[in-house]
Amino acid sequence: DVVLTQSPLSLPVTLGQPASISCRSNQSLLYSDGNTYLNWFQQRPGQSPRRLIYKVSNRDSGVPDRFSGSGSGTDFTLKISGVEAEDVAVYYCLHGTHWPPVYTFGQGTKLEI
Amino acid sequence: EVQMLESGGGLVQPGGSLRLSCAASGFTFSTYAMSWVRQAPGKGLEWVSSISGSGTNTFYADSVKGRCTISRDNSKSTLYLQLSSLRAEDTAVYFCARIHLVGANYWGQGALVTVSS
């Protein structure tokens, strides 16, 4: 089974400064179709999760370009180039496959100002 | 506009049962696999179960296997989760979600299930 380990679990940051979250898998996430289905989600306090990044590095519509994703194989990173107040949230990495539709979340990283 | 609205949450005693519903609109419901994801108070997200678009295939996390049944009624665009033999550790907000690895994702607002005597 895929296990995703995020670090750090808590990330104090200063407004305007960059932030970086790591997500490591216990096995390669490269799928047989050549894609790597590693997503990043943001969950603001009291809200439902919202996807930011799909397939490692593709930003969802409406996601500010200060968010970027990178990585391959077993190591992935979500970066925020300059943290804004609205970025206070818990961030999760997610892995899944098209079939079967089963999913694994990382433990979450709480970003706080 | 896509909307997903969960209902059926509440307080249930240990060992009891509960059925959650998720009414979806704004997309062709039968085309998509659907999932339930839960979040215990102050904890992270945990995938619980998924069902194929036709309803033929179902998948469960080990933590709920044997105690949980996912189903759907495509004529009503509604997803269900039947929870039974509930334990305190099943206390969580349960989200209905259309998780797509590439396409758009949609999540409901969540339904709180509290297992307590």
Image: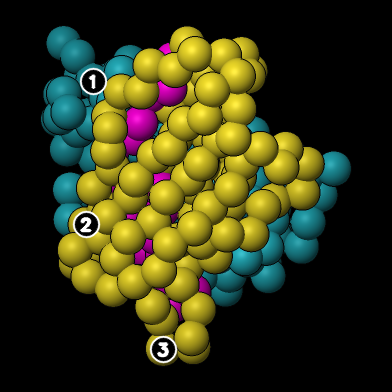
Chain colours: A yellow, B cyan
Front residue of this view, candidates B8 and B112: B112
Residue type (three-letter) at the residue carrying disc 2: Val
Residue B115: numbered disc: 1
Q: Residue at x 43, y 37 (%)?
A: A20
The image shows residue A1 at horizontal and vertical percentages of: 19, 66
**Mark 3, residue position:** A32
Q: Is residue B61 above or below residue B37?
A: below
Q: Is residue A83 left or right of residue B68?
A: right
Q: Residue at x 59, y 48 (%)?
A: A68
State which chain disc 3 sits on: A
Q: Is residue A75 visible?
A: yes
Q: Is residue B49 visible?
A: no
Q: Are marks 3 and 1 in contact (CB under 8 Å)?
A: no
Q: Which residues are magenta?
A: A93-112
**How many other residues sit within 10 Å of disc 1, few (<14), some (14-19) or many (≥20)?**
many
Nearer to us: label 1 or label 2 = 2
Helix, strand or loop under label 3: loop
Q: Residue at x 36, y 23 (%)?
A: A11
**Mark 2, residue position:** A3
Front residue of this view, candidates A68 and B92: A68
**How many other residues sit within 10 Å of disc 3, few (<14), some (14-19) or many (≥20)?**
few
Residue type (three-letter) at the residue carrying disc 1: Val
